[in-house]
Image (cartoon, rainbow, N blue to C red):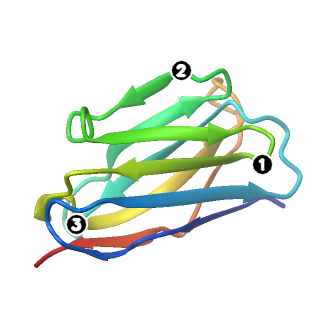
Amino acid sequence: QVQVVESGGGLVQPGGSLTLSCVASGTIARFYRMGWYRQVPGFQRELVATITSNGRTNYGVSAEGRFTITRDNAKVAVYLHMNSLRPEDTAVYSCKLETGLAVESPYYWGRGTQVTVSS
């Protein structure tokens, strides 16, 4: 069984920084891609950033220039370094592990961690 666990969320002031961590454990067939998504109640989940096992990154519009995603392949872990945070970044941030590009490839979600940006 695969577990994906996020940590690092919390309350931060506007303009501040925060780093989220996501670690996957269990019998993982392959680390193809991991990434962060966020969701605000009543709105659709949106892409924040993803990174493949060979380091290729993809960022959502809201994250460009402010957030950086990094990985640790040995630990099957990814980190989201968030700077210049804004109140509109407030959301539940969830981590997703993908084991392949094919539609039938298993993927796993964590439960999410709350990020609140407020003064």
The kind of residue tagged 2 is: Arg
Residue toward you, 54 or 38: 54
Using residue 26 as the reference point, say whether residue 65 is left or right of it.
left
Residue toward you, 99 or 22: 22
Residue 15 sits above or below residue 34 on the image:
below
For label 3, the SS is: loop
Alpha carbons under labels 1 and 3: distance apart: 28 Å
- For marks 1 and 3, the one nearer the N-term is 1
Q: Circle 3 sits on which residue?
A: 90
Residue found at the far front of this picture: 16
Using residue 68 as the reference point, say whether residue 56 is left or right of it.
right
Residue 56 image label:
2
Alpha carbons under labels 1 and 2: distance apart: 18 Å
Alpha carbons under labels 3 and 2: distance apart: 26 Å
Residue drawn 29% across the image and 35% down it: 60
Residue 12 x %, y %: 25, 73
- Which quarter of the picture shows residue 2? bottom right
Quarter holding the C terminus? bottom left
For label 2, the SS is: loop
Q: Circle 1 sits on which residue?
A: 75
Using residue 26 as the reference point, say whether residue 45 is left or right of it.
left
- For marks 1 and 2, the one nearer the N-term is 2
Residue drawn 14% across the image and 75% down it: 118
Quarter holding the N terminus? bottom right
For label 1, the SS is: loop
The kind of residue tagged 1 is: Lys
The answer to whether the residues at label 1 and label 2 have Cβ atoms under 8 Å apart is no
- Which quarter of the picture shows residue 61? top left
